[in-house]
Amino acid sequence: MTAVLQIRDVTLGYRELTLFRRLTMDIEAGTTLAVLGANGSGKSTFVKMLLGLIDPLSGSLNWPKGRPREIGYLAQMTEFDRRFPIRVRDLAAMGAWRGFGFRSGLDNAARDRMTAALDEAGVLDIADRPIHMLSGGQLQRALFARVIMQDAPLILLDEPFAAVDQSTEAHLLSIIHRWRDEGRSVVLVVHDLSSVLDHCSHALLLGGQEAKHGPVDDVLTPDRLVAQGYLSESQASWMFRSSPKPQEPAHV
Amino acid sequence: MFELLSEMWGFAFMRRAFVVTTVLSASVAPVGAFLVLRRLSLAGEAMAHAITPGIVIGFVTAGLSVMSLLVGGLIAGVGVAMLTALLARRTILRSDASLASLYLIALAVGIFILSAAGSAVPLKSFLFGSILGIDDASMLLVGGVATVTLVAFAFLLRPLIVSTCDPVFFETQTRRPWLVDQGFMLLLVLNLLAAFKTLGTLMAVGLMILPATAARYWASTITAQLVLGFVFALSSCWIGLTLSYLFPETPSGPAIVLVAGGIFLVSAIFGPLGFGKRARKPVVSNDIPVAQIQQEEKAQ
């Protein structure tokens, strides 16, 4: 497998606060990485570092094939303005705007891509609705359509399922599977030990100024989850009462 | 009535007033639209006060010319905008509190200098302008600012849309996100200065905000918002000017803003996104699977 990104000896944090020290790992093409950790352990900061918005305190990020022009990104919806007057179609088109600069029209190829993206995300029928009429799940689908339009080799999703129902989650997971099968790398910040982990090949556990990376099974052990402050001992013993391992990863 | 109206066109100052407000409407409408969408409606007002010391210092040192107004106002406006951004980024204060603190200081400085210089400038014309006495230099200023604004919007429109709707996503799309914020603030200051001589600072903000908020009650897309905002601004100016001609006792600036206010109230009551909810489709509050919505829509 080929690495999209090599993280070498990276220490991440802010001037007065170190989040984790000396992380070395590769993000490989066609893999799905789950990022877990307690609140404040640096999950979102890690994502921002991959986006180039924050520099590591030390260490380096190497892009063997060059830094991709576009990195797919879906943020938490906290700063999103849901009352902005824009239709689903144009929200999705934002993902391709950088390629078209200041010109107003997308070309025919991009239009076809957009129809396909809206269809895959399940919002083609409501493409002309303004976003203030959407439910939380519909808005998340529309934002997935925008990520599809970005057509990026590396895709970062920050808690994409925090506010959506089970059927939407299943639908969006199928899109993530398609990305992985096409050889894109997906980094997924997840906020709990949910079934989402079934769909991830690797995990990165942050907490206690440490970062542990590896296959899901190797990282998410009861001992380690307790050691890095993600679970208390009683929580760990309850969650892992039936089996020693949390999940069987579907793809390794 | 019609004689009165046709007589109105015989006056050069009325023709000038119509031309200037038409150009001004095209210029301030897009700025107003994004002030409202970026939740900066009150920042427009604050910035109008903040440029006062610059204008006053320009006036005291170089007399009441368009150039002194432009240079003084630009320095004060851009200075306050940059200091606001600096305070918001480096200290605990948010940008609204930073701007509020700075514009109050600036306003006090302006009035202090004006009083200390003991000049005979009527403060009223600073605040309310004099639309019926517009000279060539003022017309050139309005025309120049409108040109700069519309050209800038051709480039800034998409970045502005993305940074307003989804600021976090916007940060990942550009290396210099602050360029859009500061560029927009510069356009705001320029438009306030353009409107200063004609409408006065207070009325200028009225012509920016009211057509934009009125349009908000009708528009579901950014294009509709921009076009409607312009139409409302233009109607306000034309109707307001005509009214102030027909009733000579009424001042033109407030007449224009009052018409805009009337359009706003009507829009709030009858617009599909205002109180008139019947025209609006129900907002789906719970997550309903898309397939179910489609079935319901087919059934209707």
Image (tube, coloured by chain):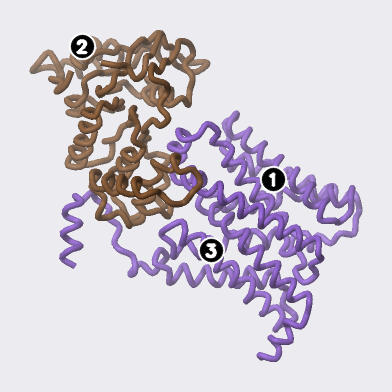
Chain colours: A brown, B purple
Q: Chain of mark 1?
A: B
SS at circle 3:
helix
Q: Nearer the viewer, mark 1 or mark 2?
A: 2
**Crowd around label 3: few <14 · some 14–19 · many ≥20 (10 Å):** many
**Crowd around label 1: few <14 · some 14–19 · many ≥20 (10 Å):** many
Q: Which residue is mark 1?
A: B103
Name the residue rendered at 49%, 43% in the picture: A101
Looking at numbered disc 2 in the image, what kind of residue is underneath it?
Asp
SS at circle 1:
helix
Name the residue rendered at 14%, 17% in the picture: A240
Residue B242, picture quadrant = bottom right
Which quarter shows the N terminus of chain B? bottom right
Name the residue rendered at 20%, 31% in the picture: A177
Q: Does A172 sit above or below residue B209?
A: above
Q: Does A92 sit above or below residue A152?
A: below
Looking at numbered disc 3 in the image, what kind of residue is underneath it?
Gly
The answer to whether one can see residue B53 in this image is: no
Q: Chain of mark 2?
A: A
Marking on residue B229: 3
SS at circle 2:
helix
Marking on residue A148: none
User: Which of the two discs, 1 and 3, labels the residue nearer the N terminus?
Assistant: 1
B230 to the left or right of B246: left
Q: Which residue is mark 2?
A: A218
